[in-house]
Image (cartoon, grey):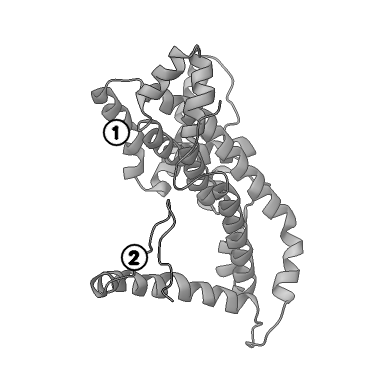
Amino acid sequence: MKKNTTVPVGTRRKKLPTPGASILNAPYLLWAALFIIIPLFIVVYYAFTDANGNFTTENMSGLADYTSVMLRSLWYSLAATAICLLIAYPFAYVVCKFRPTSQKVANMFVTIPLWINLLIRTYCLTTLMDNNGLINQALAFLGMGRLPLMNNTGAVIFGMVYNYLPYMILPIYNVMSRIDPSLLEAGEDLGCNALQRVRRIVMPLSLPGVISGIIMVFVPSVSTFYISAKMGGTGDYMIGDLIENQIHAQNNNLPTAAALSLVLMVVILVSMFILNRFTDDEEGGSMLV
């Protein structure tokens, strides 16, 4: 009896990789093995071994002493991500209303800071916000008191927003710019005002860009160390600073640094998994009715 090989409607046959495609993927697989997979195994190894190479869970259990640092890192990164989203979303929406030439100019100004190294950008920011920086010198010249712009929580969050804001703007703009204008026209014909068109059409369709922007800002924010060390005070210690200090300590405490790194990776992966649950990879969003 002949088997029924009919493919159901709406499904696609998975194409098997050809020998040519396997050859082209070989360099990437080698790169991933050398610089992603193997380093992850090294981190896991040090996280569960002691100085003598014996298996232990003390490194993980000892992380309870750094709970306050981890919570502070999460709080700072979430605050910076939320502020970036509040600034980037309306900015991207307004830029999409510009003429194509003006959009290119706006995108150029957004990407120009990315051409400069993060360390240099942060150092230049400190020269502006320091007690003897240009801002406070201008305030003193105008007869106003100097403001405590540095060495506090606000400075750290502002530094992260300043450095990572373009990573929120660009993915949101890229998704918004591809929204079919006829959808907005249809919403207007159906009686939707400007606010309703944004809420029911633009926001659902731009959700994939929002999720990408949140991931691209949250991941470097939660693991940052130079910004908090340069712009924060003694109470703004973050998990990135802690990992760096453990590595450069006199006793070279790699097991604790690896355990902290492992926890940080788990937090990032869980966050990315949760955020990706809100997007539809195939449709890229849906309109609300």
Q: Tell which circle, 2 or 1, labels the residue nearer the N-terminal end.
A: 2
Confirm whether residue 236 shows in the render: no
Q: Position of residue 193 (x, y in %)?
A: 50, 12
* Location of residue 269 with respect to 165 vertically, above or below: below
* Location of residue 28 with respect to 53 vertically, above or below: above
Q: Position of residue 80 (x, y in %)?
A: 57, 39
- Give the camera-side residue of 212 and 239: 212
Relative horizontal placement of residue 197, taking residue 233 as reference (left or right): left
Labelled pair 2, 1 in contact (Cβ < 8 Å): no
Relative horizontal placement of residue 246, taking residue 136 as reference (left or right): right
Identify the image quadrant of the C terminus: top right
Which residue in the structure is indicated by mark 2? 15
Query: How many marks on residues?
Result: 2
Helix, strand or loop for disc 1: helix
Which residue in the structure is indicated by mark 1? 108
Q: Position of residue 88 (x, y in %)?
A: 47, 31
* Location of residue 272 with respect to 209 vertically, above or below: below
Cα gap from disc 2 to disc 1, whole angstroms: 39 Å
Who's the residue at 62% across and 57% down the image? Answer: 267
